[in-house]
Amino acid sequence: MDIRSRIVHAGQDRDPYTGASSVPIYLASTFDQRRILSQGRHDYTRSGNPTRDALEAAMADLENGAAALAFASGMAAVSSTLLLLSPGDHVVAGRDLYGGSFRVLTTLFSRWGLATTFVDTSSPDAVQAAIRPATRAIFVETPSNPHLGITDLPLMASIARSRGLLSIADNTFATPYLQRPLDFGFDVVVHSATKFLGGHSDVLAGIAVVRDEEITARMRFIQNAFGAVLGVQDCWLLLRGLKTLAVRMDACQAGAAEIARRLAAHPRVRRVYHPGLPDHPGRDVHERQASGPGAVLSFDLETPALAERLLDRARLPLVSVSLGGVESILCHPATMSHASMPREARAARGIGDELVRLSVGLEAPGDILADIEDALAD
Ligand SMILES: Cc1ncc(COP(=O)(O)O)c(C=O)c1O
């Protein structure tokens, strides 16, 4: 079935017991195991809950995975996935990874004994060169944060497979509506479901989707043993948000494409980063592996003072971390999403004080543009 139909029905079709249009919120921490109603499938909510099952079934279906697992946040999904590795292992990770993923790798996991080398994963040679005897995984994000850098997913999956490495892709920016890394051979997809999947800036959640049964069993063990599961009411909110993913994504990315084009011609904007622009590095690769450019763009203003002015004066968008909401969100990566990264690490990645990221929401694109233009005017 077309993904637009699956987005509405997968995992959350009519409640089998009552016919209710929406999956009930099973606010139960424990289940009487003699009951035939639960068919012995549930015992304790950390290990499984029917509402969480529905969300996990929906996400497994949309990402074409064997199973999905819901976590308390995107970082809980990322960290729980990294627990597939062991002390002494080494990871090759994208240089442009989300700041929180960088932080957890370079603080908690490095202290635990997991080493990471950060490379530009748009360069297969750089990835190959960083692989050592102890390397066990490749971790990429595409489009990446905040420069919308593109990594060739089929190529990365084939490098990982040929070197016997686990491959992990953060698919937060594209969502399964636009891009499905497991189809290209990736082993695990992670999401900050807080973003486009939830879509309404009202829930914090994470998802991991796994391609095969063997890794699924290991991930289920980690989810239950480590315990960073998503609460039942948040599972329901996410199911609710997910149903409109396709229409939200279509509208938001149409707006983003228009705004990116217009900002590229703005005299105070030095450079715009958006996979829909003709000169965006890796655009061809992105078009081969994704069905749209997504709804996020970043831009360098002429000076840091202009970025400050825009953030002070813009009235329509939220000025905050996060993205993927129905409302547009302006973010200053250097002081917000990437503040957890040391200044030198930010400078090495071209994340200057003049860089601004815009997640385009469902407002009329003309209104967002007018707001930005007004804010940038003298
Ligand atoms: C690409 C990406 N991955 C992971 C995360 C972490 O997700 P969360 O904030 O839900 O823990 C974020 C959050 O901004 C993100 O943008």
Image: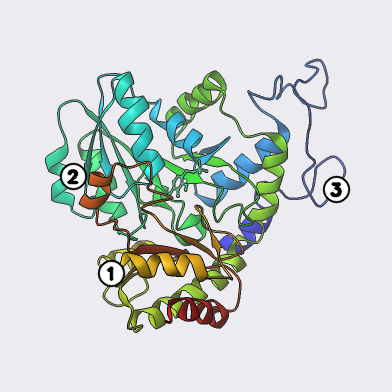
- The residue where tag 3 is placed is 19
Residue occupying image coordinates x 54% and y 79%: 365
Q: Amino acid at mark 2?
A: Val
Do callouts 1 and 2 mark residues in contact (Cβ within 8 Å)? no
The residue indicated by pointer 1 is 284
Which mark lies nearer to you, 3 or 1? 1
SS class of the residue under badge 3?
Answer: loop
For marks 3 and 1, give the CA distance.
Answer: 45 Å
Could you say which quadrant of the image residue 351 lies in? bottom left
Marks 3 and 1, the one that precedes in the sequence = 3
**Mark 1 residue type:** Asp
Image coordinates for residue 274, horizontal then vertical, percent:
36, 69
**In x, y percent, where is residue 86?**
32, 20
Real-space CA distance between mark 1 and mark 2, rounded to the nearest whole angstrom: 20 Å
Direction from residue 292 to residue 94 in the image, left or right? left
Q: Who comes first in sequence, dot 1 or dot 2?
A: 2
Q: Residue at x 54, y 53 (%)?
A: 195
**Where, quadrant-wise, is the C terminus in this rendering?**
bottom left
Residue 143, relative to residue 371: is it above or below?
A: above
Quadrant position of the N terminus in the picture: bottom right
Q: Secondary structure at mark 2?
A: helix
Viewer-nearest of labels 3 and 2?
2
Query: In the rendering, at what x and y percent does residue 305 appear?
Result: 35, 67
Q: Residue at the spot x=58%, y=35% of the render?
A: 72
